[in-house]
């Protein structure tokens, strides 16, 4: 049985995994780059080991140092979290070769699902529907194939992730140019320029299924998450159940998700992503993420299951403690990702010191955060501040609760997307449950924050009050030590 786990990650995910480990009575080991010396995940761990400088020399990608750290403290296992090394088959293999357990799927399943065109071929064999498309290598073929698929087409990187190397093409004139740009981007991001074409499904919805396999013959799903609220092809609000699924479609997609996971003998937690065309109600396999996902808390709220403790259980060779029929759900869960970014300026990431971070507590409200008041958001890492998740009796209740939670979240010192998220929730399209993946670009592109004069006045008043309360050192001899409010520089 595990006694000590090293967590090869940072931020809210490292914190989330540590909570699961610590509540199970396990010791936790953090690793950290120089930029994270004072980070919350380091303060929270029972032991912490430095692994080097921040990017561009990305220490969290240094599998060798992380494995050496795990060995030096006699950890039993490594949890990769998500991002960084979580889907790296070589790392998973190296962990095993070092006599440690990798908490996640086997390297073979990762390899087969990690490459989008390979995964598409595999899914086709398993009878799981895939988006009409083509994986070829000769440029001349591409324009012919794009014509056959029918415009708009989507150029995608085979090794892709994070929306990189993706280009929508509406007209044949733009195809070659888009392919070349996608190839360059993919080469730079993944060291692999292979691209393929897919039918671009307009007005689509992103609906994914949480799956879990125990390597002992049992693979189950824990229902869906709808993640259609996206900016730049990346999720910002997720919810479950999906407002567009009925029981029949849910049942069929759930079965397809389980079949997809079984096709690679999947072990541990994973997600099967589908794209759904709301006009035809057809669904298509998009990709499998062979790891725990950012948005897992809503599945935990809905089903009452702790996915990280299940991951630990399965990694220790134990079977899943329930069958498909035992997976039940209650209510409606929503997650909002609070980012340090400027929604009025193309979601440009913001950096700076968080002068105050306060999150609400209430029944059915959950906060996953890797930072606290005084922490720094740096250019080096993802600018996520926190994930706010709520469980309501039904969708309307969950939306109201989320709005309350967002209103009672205070983050000072950096620009955030909090008021943007509130406006998305209040938008009639969101309220009707009809958000498609192009919604934000289409409906919220011109979004500007409410310029709230009252709030500005309150800030000025607070600053004046602070300054008036400053102690004035009248006994100073040197005029430059007099601490009244005179400033030579204006
Ligand atoms: P990545 O791995 O880079 O995140 P995905 O394949 O998961 O890429 O796709 C990310 C998002 O891009 C999807 O959630 C969806 O919004 C959009 N997308 C991907 N493929 C299609 C498609 N064929 N048609 C329409 N939208 C798509």
Image (spheres, rainbow, N blue to C red):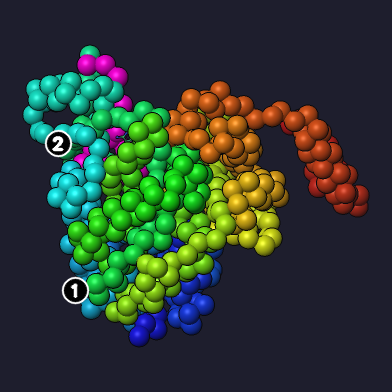
Q: Which residue occupies the foreground of this view, 85 or 351?
A: 85
Q: Which residue does the numbered mark 2 point to in the structure image? A: 135
Dot 1: within a 10 Å radius of its alpha carbon, few (fewer than 14), some, or many (20 or more) residues? few
Main SS of the magenta segment?
loop
Q: Residue furthest front?
A: 248
Location of residue 6 by image quarter: bottom left
| Residue at 36% across, 37% down | 281
Magenta stretch holds residue 164: yes
Q: Quadrant of ligand 1?
A: top left
Residue displayed at 19% across by 59% down: 263
**Spot occupied by residue 287 in the image (x, y as percentages of width and height):** 28, 47
List the residue tagged with mark 1. Answer: 97
Position in image of residue 63 (x %, y %): 27, 63
Q: Quadrant of the C terminus?
A: top right
The answer to whether 80 is drawn above or below residue 483 in the figure is below
Query: Which residue ends up furthest to the top in the rendered image?
Result: 173
Quadrant for residue 485, please give it.
top right
Q: Which residue corresponds to the image point at 67% horizontal and 62% vertical from the top-left? A: 363
Q: What stretch is highlighted in magenta?
A: 157-172
Residue 370 visible in the shown view: no
Residue 133 percent across, percent down from the top left: 19, 34
User: What is the residue that sits farthest to the right in this orientation?
Assistant: 474
Q: Is residue 27 magenta?
A: no
**Is 414 on the left-hand or right-hand side of 408?**
left
In the depicted structure, whether residue 91 falls above or below residue 320: above
């Amino acid at each position: 049985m595990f006694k000590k786990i090293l967590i090869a990650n940072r931020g809210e995910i490292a914190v989330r995994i540590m909570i699961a480990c610590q509540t199970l009575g396990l010791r936790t080991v953090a690793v950290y780059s120089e930029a994270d010396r004072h980070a919350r995940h380091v303060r929270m761990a029972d032991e912490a080991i430095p692994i080097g400088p921040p990017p561009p020399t990305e220490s969290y990608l240094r599998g060798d140092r992380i494995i050496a750290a795990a060995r030096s403290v006699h950890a039993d296992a490594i949890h990769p979290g998500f991002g960084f090394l979580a889907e790296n088959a070589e790392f998973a293999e190296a962990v095993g070769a070092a006599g440690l357990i990798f908490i996640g799927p086997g390297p073979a399943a990762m390899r087969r699902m990690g490459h989008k065109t390979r995964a598409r071929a595999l899914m086709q064999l398993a009878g799981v529907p895939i988006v009409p498309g083509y994986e070829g290598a000769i440029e001349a073929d591409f324009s012919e194939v794009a014509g056959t698929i029918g415009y708009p087409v989507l150029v995608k990187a085979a090794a892709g992730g994070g929306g990189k190397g993706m280009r929508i093409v509406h007209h044949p004139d733009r195809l070659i140019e888009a392919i070349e740009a996608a190839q360059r981007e993919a080469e730079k991001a993944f060291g692999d320029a292979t691209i393929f074409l897919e039918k671009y499904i307009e007005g689509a919805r992103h609906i994914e299924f949480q799956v879990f396999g125990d390597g002992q013959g049992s693979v189950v799903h824990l229902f869906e998450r709808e993640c259609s609220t996206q900016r730049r092809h990346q999720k910002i609000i997720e919810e479950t159940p999906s407002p567009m699924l009925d029981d029949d479609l849910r049942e069929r997609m759930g079965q397809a998700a389980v079949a997809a996971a079984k096709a690679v003998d999947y072990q541990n937690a994973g997600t099967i992503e589908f794209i759904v065309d709301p006009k035809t109600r057809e669904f298509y396999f998009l990709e499998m993420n062979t790891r725990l996902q950012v948005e897992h808390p809503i599945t935990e709220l809905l089903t009452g299951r702790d996915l990280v403790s299940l991951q630990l259980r399965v990694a220790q060779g134990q079977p899943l403690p329930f069958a498909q029929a035992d997976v039940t759900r209650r209510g409606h869960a929503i997650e909002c990702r609070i980012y340090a970014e400027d929604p009025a300026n193309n979601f440009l990431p913001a950096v700076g010191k968080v002068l105050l971070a306060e999150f609400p507590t209430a029944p059915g409200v959950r906060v996953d955060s890797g930072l606290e008041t005084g922490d720094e958001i740096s250019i080096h890492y993802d600018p996520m501040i926190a994930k706010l998740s709520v469980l309501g009796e039904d969708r309307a209740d969950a939306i109201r609760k989320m709005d309350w939670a967002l209103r009672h979240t205070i983050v000072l010192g950096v620009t955030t997307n909090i008021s943007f998220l509130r406006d998305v929730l209040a938008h009639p399209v969101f309220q009707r449950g009809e958000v498609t993946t192009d919604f934000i670009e289409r409906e919220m592109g011109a979004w500007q924050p409410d310029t709230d004069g009252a709030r500005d006045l309150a800030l000025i008043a607070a600053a004046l009050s602070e300054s008036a309360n400053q102690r004035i050192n009248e006994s100073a001899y040197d005029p430059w030590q007099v601490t009244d409010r005179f400033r030579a520089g204006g």
